Amino acid sequence: MSKPRLVDDCQRKVDVLKRMRENTDWTDASERQKLLGTLYSFLDDWTGTPPRIRQIFNSEEIEQLIVTSFSYRQRDRFLNFLIESGLKDRPKYDEFHRMVTSRVTPLLLAAKDWYENGFGTYERRVLAPKLFKVYDTFDRNFNCRDDETNFTHFHAACMTGCLHAVEMFLKTKSIRCIDIYLDKTGETPLHLAVKNGNVKVVHLLLSYGADPTRRNNDGLTPVLMASQASFKTAGMMELLLKSFEVGPLKRLDHLNLNTKDKKGNTALHHALANGDWDMAKQLLKHNANPDISNDAGVTPLHIIVRNHIGTDLAEFFRLVDANHRMKVRVNARDADGNTPLHFAIDRDHRPTIELLLRRHKADPNVCNAAGSMPSHLICDKSRDENLAQFFWNICKEKKKSVEVNKKDACGRTPLQLAVKNRHPELCRLLLEHVPDKHLVNFRFPSEYRDIGPIFEGTRLEAAANLLWILEILAERKCEPTLADAMAMLRFLNDHGMFHQGHQREIEALRLLPEGNSFVVRAQETELITGQSLWDLLQLTPGQQQQVKYSDYSRIARTRKLEDLPQLQQRAFFAHMHELMLRDFCSKWAEKSLAALLDHELPTKTGRVIVDDGEAQGMGPGKEPARRAFLDERSKWAEKSLAALFYTNNENLYNICIGRKIERKK
């Protein structure tokens, strides 16, 4: 396009914009958007030098278009057009020709929105720098101030990290950083720079005398704010801490590093809570208090242990020893009464447990607000006896006695918790430390820990572990009462551990011919020492003594049965349940009948009721008497078992009695 034609085309576009400007209702946002849309369409093929924008629009209209452009996807296009046209902000004057002392510019509106709602890389690196190219009057900062919030262009520059703008403001010497703050939040430009990770701006502000000890309305100093930041900005805390090493601030070093926020947290609390160990080390080296508590009683040591910062704990103690005269309270209790050792036990972090017990004299018997000692937590949380053995071995080496008979706030001893959670080996370990005199009044739990996701193996393991515990306690002459046994039976029944209707599947498996693929596999699959899957399938009631409760627990955990068809798995586990539970249920069914009849049944009479084999062995001559006895007692048996088990579950009834007691039709 020739130069004359190019000039004509540009002039035509300018004329179109002027006509649209005259016909635009500037109070209507949609009309402003329409005008800006036309301008954007012209920008796509605009060639040559942009026109002087003030020849088309006045200052107020330009600012309205800038604000309107913020809602567009390409928010910087209009700003680019303004910058290329050479637009610069001009001061405003009132009717008396006095300079307006405050005004809200598009830059202020944008910055306030970013301050309240957050902003990203685009705003920081693109939009803010371009706005400052238009609003580059750095010697009249307070002419651009929002009276409601006291937010200024200087705040915006510090917040967005526009280093050039900050430098220009400070070089005019018309700004004293120490005096500027926001009315609503009390935040200074230094607060804003720290909060948004603008390290270079922080360095510049500190060099011009910004106060790192000043609090905002939430009680946060810049140091506290830096420790709270979710991002890790290298050098930020180091800059702030160095400002305490020179001048009048040196006397305030200890005081201000331990300044607390509204919840009583110091910078060290926040740094550790965010997992920023490097920042925590800097604070400790500058004498931040390592033993200060927040309003919830939490010390830095609590946070290190609770957040599982691992090997940093040893370094924490080394730094404290090197930089502080005070000792850290290893037995400090938070609002819930928990010590660092409680947290270490709860998280099963053994290096921390060992360090606290061996080197720092943590008390193994301190109780929290729930009355729980570390031994209570071990028995309530641990999945095995290894943690308990580890804990007791260290205490024994350090000659620290561990109380195992003390009750928590719910009246439970560690042994009772181990029984409730069905940990046989843990019970055996605890019994090594419990004298006989404390077992005389031992009470079994009335409830047991829920099984969780129910699979055939988990049911068998839960029942096996419970009966295994009874066997272990019986070795110390500790037997459950009838009520205890009924609570156990209710637990077993509620979790579907009394199966029925699997006999046909078991018989079908037993009748499979030699050489069948299942038979071969079952014979080769050893589930416990000396017993294969096939051997266990052949066991019948009366032969269950060949398998220990610990063996049943091991069978329940095996993964060798995973490839079996589900029907065969279910039948096998049901078979294991019946073998394991028959003796226990028969014993307590007999005792329950005796209790309801107010006297103990003769041994043979009890067996007649609970064992069909004995009943059949009474002989033909005694058949009438046997039938009469069973007819009478069948009513008692059914009522007593239903009452005691709180159920009419026929499967449970059949297993406990050993047969269906004949009843009159």
Image (tube, rainbow, N blue to C red):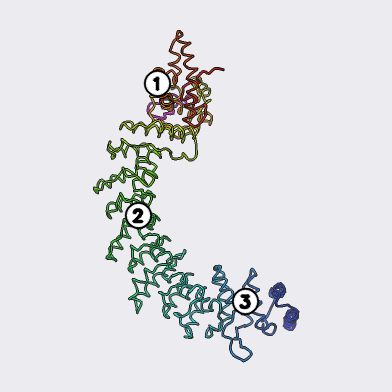
Q: Is residue 531 magenta?
A: yes
Quick check: can you spot residue 58?
Answer: yes
Q: Say above or below: 96 vs 361.
A: below
The residue beneath circle 1 is: 601
Location of residue 279 (image quadrant): bottom left
Front residue of 461 and 161: 461
The label number, if any, that marks residue 340 in the structure image: 2
Mark 1 or 2 closer to N-term?
2
On screen, residue 276 above or below 421 = below
Q: Nearer the viewer, residue 498 or 545?
A: 498
Residues at discs 3 and 1 in contact (Cβ within 8 Å): no
Residue 636: % across, % down:
48, 23
The amino acid on which the numbered mark 2 sits, given as a three-letter code, is Pro
Quadrant where the N terminus is found in the figure: bottom right
What x and y, as percent, mark residue 466?
40, 34
- Would you say residue 124 sits in the magenta stretch? no
Determine the secondary structure under disc 1.
loop
Residue placed most toward the observer, 554 or 25 = 25
Report the magenta residues as a range.
519-534
Label 3, secondary structure: give it.
helix
Depth check, mark 2 against mark 3: the one in front is: 2
**At 60% across and 85% down in the image, what residue appears?**
90
Q: Nearer the viewer, residue 210 or 98?
A: 98
